[in-house]
Amino acid sequence: MTLKHKIEIFGLSDVGLVRDHNEDSIGNNQDLGLVVLADGMGGHRGGEVASAITVNTILDTLADTLKKTSPGGIDEKSGHSLESIAVHDAVTRANANVFNASNESSQYRGMGTTVVVLLFYDGRFTVAHVGDSRLYRYRDGELEQITRDHSLTQELVERGFYTAEQAEQSLNKNMVTRAVGIEETVEVDVFDGVVHPGDIYLLCSDGVTDMVKDGTINKTITNNSEDLEEIAAELIRVSNESGGKDNISAILARPLKPFLANTNKNLFSRFFELFS
């Protein structure tokens, strides 16, 4: 089942005002309803290599895997959707590819990247992420952060050492506690949810979230909600206007109509989720 005409996708990436090159990578496959964003790190352009390897690996792996996957299927052993398992495994493969490339070239030694992956399927979405690049969902005028940052600052907030306001001023706020490619294995967070047509999903690097508060992101989407391209352009403009201290990437996706693989099954599932 192609999602080409059922999901609208648009993304932009900008070098910002301080960096001399862009270590972010973005990509999508509209037929699959797949969106990927990675924010690289590492000297001698290692960051842009790591992020590019990660995005390309995930796009290629899922294009191959999902051809063989029945939409909405469930793995009997784990109880997870086949799509969420496929996304998890694609990130794991990307980690191996970046780690191996790092070990094969001294100039790229220690390179790594954050990643956030969004896949739509069978009336649902699954998101996998590592690091502090984020996924937000905008629904009925409200912005919700779906992912949880894998960062030292986030851990300190959760342990009560910082308030959210103090965390914004922290010198350690860009120190991630997980990244793709740094170690031989990586822990990947995966989350599933139900899609409502008209929702807007925003994947962004910390070049946006370090410069722009959630309230401003919400207002930007509200004021430009009819045009994903305008939202992306405005987020980059505001991020640069606020200092542009990092590379800036934003990619947006909006489901336009239902995309159910099995109508009867999904009507029952939707009813159960609404009234259970």
Image: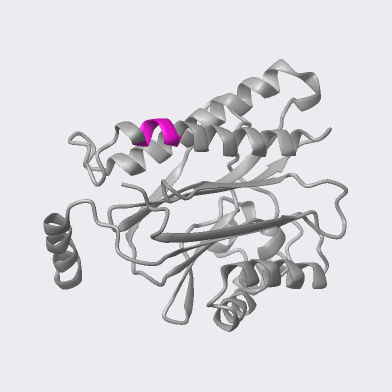
Residue at x 60% of width, y 74% of height? 214
60 or 74: nearer the viewer:
60
**Is residue 2 within the magenta segment?**
no
151 or 127: nearer the viewer:
127
In the rendered view, tell whether residue 78 sits above or below residue 118. above
Residue 101 figure quarter: top right
Residue at x 50% of width, y 57% of height? 148
Q: Position of residue 15 (x, y in %)?
A: 80, 54
In the rendered view, tell whether residue 246 sits above or below residue 218. above
In the rendered view, tell whether residue 179 sits above or below residue 222. above
Q: Is residue 151 visible?
A: yes
Q: Is residue 14 left or right of residue 4?
A: right
Assign the C terminus to one quadrant of the image: bottom left
Residue range (magenta): 62-66
Q: Residue furthest top?
A: 104
Q: Which color scheme is applied?
A: one colour
Q: Is residue 225 left or right of residue 49?
A: left
Number of numbered discs on residues: 0
Residue at x 36% of width, y 48% of height? 2
Q: Position of residue 121 (x, y in %)?
A: 33, 51
Q: Position of residue 111 (x, y in %)?
A: 71, 32
69 or 101: nearer the viewer:
69
